[in-house]
Image (tube, helix red, strand yellow):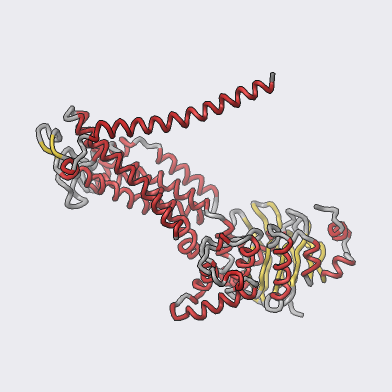
Amino acid sequence: MRNNNGKTSHLSLRLWLFLSVFLVMASLCVIFGYIFIQGGSELSLSFLTNMPQGFPLGIDGGIWPAIVGSFWFTTIACIFASFLALPTAIFLAFYAKTTRIVSLCHFFIHSMAGIPSIILGLFGYTFFVVTLDFGVSILSGGLILGIMIFPFIEVRVEKTLLEFPKNIMQASISLGITKTWTLFHLILPGCIGNIASAIALGGSFAMGATAPILFTGAVLFAPSPRSIFSPAMALPNHLYILVGQGVSISKAYGTALVLIILLLVLNIVPLVIKMYRKER
Amino acid sequence: MLPILEIRQLAVAFDNKKILKKIDANFYPHQITAIIGPSGCGKSTFLKSLNRLIEDERGVSLSGQIHLDGEDTFTLSPEEVRRRIGMVFQSPTPFPLSIYDNMAYPLRYHGHGAKKNKKSLDSIIRNKLEDVGLFEEVKDNLAMNATLLSGGQQQRLCIARALTVEPEILLLDEPCSSLDVKNTQNIEMMLRTLCQQYSIIIVTHNLFQARRISHQTLFMLDGEIIEAGSTKDLFENPRDSRTAEYISGIYG
């Protein structure tokens, strides 16, 4: 009997595993497929390259300023977050002297990851927009998105650095080479694919976020931004307005499709980098 | 004969757990010294103290003196000490670079990187690869990634790489433990030749190996050196009963 029980639970475990994997794959396909079908008819060159038009605004025309705006928000967020996350990860992985400091920093970083994005938006408004007087702008929105994705990037980069074999690093150090030189000539070049992938994933997280830029950078309508001090449209915010104000459901699906395609492209970038590096 | 490396009262502890208990030892030039002893007796820690690699580990405290050619190593920079005392690890540690770049990496750091030095860089690399008997095997594949070499070739590459910076002493931490008999033989023969130019300190689990290749042997137990002397004496007439027990195979 016992044997039989083991077999049954083994079978049900396998079934559970199989079903979970299947459900995840299937739901992803359904979401993508649905958006492709619904938004596909809207997709055209003029939708991609025109300004939103009509009344209420957005019922006609395209989403070009929102694409450009999202691009800038994401770029600034990635630059700012990487600027903070890379040194933090390097410090925690290689230079922190005691485990106490490491645990303390991890506590802060994990807490930071848990801050609701709307609260980050509120903070960004009072700090960047009002106190630092950056105004409602790409800069304010990008910085607050950067703060949002910082823990996301830091954790992944730190993990990658820690996975770099310790004995290889010791071999370099025992050749009389400093840790810093080893870091820049051996470890970082070896991890560059995974670091790029962490930044790109962080970027796609930022590109899809609405709440942080709601009060700090994104507006209902703006032409393609001229500088990082001007406010801009952003794809997720535009989508929110199109649906929330009942402007146009079909335009909303078109926007959603463009956003999803951009996210897919961002996720493919690190894969291409890795493949390219493998070939070399 | 004056020792090249003199260790006085060396004590190492990790978070207050004593690993090495005030060790004294001498190592002589152009000799192979084998360090033997059961697992966990502090052999590897001892070896890593000699080139100050141990200082990078968390929670370590260290006291005592190490003199290299009469100079106190703690007054030198750790980089200087490590350049003069090379190290090879238990499992091969090829960098994820080409064979050529593995060899050029330390040379570039130590100032052989300039373009006009390309010829001297090439000749050092060739010489050192010849010293470990690897040049003939890889001369047509220097651009190949070093991680694709066999285990024995990788280990010889690591030895050659350690020699590029012209150390005076070479530390080896069980370099043959992951290799087969043939590769082990290769490395042992090579070490016998290399000791004409360098002083070699090798940690080994393999008593036969210690006996075959070393001039001096040092037996460690529980963080202390129990007995040190010429390999022949130590194996044939151990003075301490614990040495006798160990070499007759009583401890694992």
In the figure, B155 relative to B193: above or below? above
In the figure, B126 relative to A171: above or below? below
**Horizontal relation, residue B20 to residue B232: left or right:** left
Which residue occupies the extreme front position in the image?
B140
The residue located at (59%, 61%) in the rendering is: B93
The residue lying toward the viewer, choosing from B42 and A205, is: A205
Position in image of residue A102 (x %, y %): 51, 48
Examine the image and state in which quarter residue B242 appears: bottom right
Position in image of residue B13 (x %, y %): 67, 56
Residue A87 visible in the picture = no
The residue lying toward the viewer, choosing from B141 and A76, is: B141
Position in image of residue B201 (x %, y %): 71, 68
The residue located at (79%, 72%) in the rendering is: B215
Residue B133 visible in the picture = yes
Which residue occupies the extreme left position in the image?
A55
In the figure, A27 relative to A226: above or below? above
Examine the image and state in which quarter residue A184 appears: bottom left
The residue lying toward the viewer, choosing from A28 and A175, is: A28
From the image, which quarter does the N terminus of chain B lie in?
bottom right
The residue located at (44%, 43%) in the rendering is: A108
**Horizontal relation, residue B143 to residue A234: left or right:** right
Position in image of residue A270 (x %, y %): 39, 50
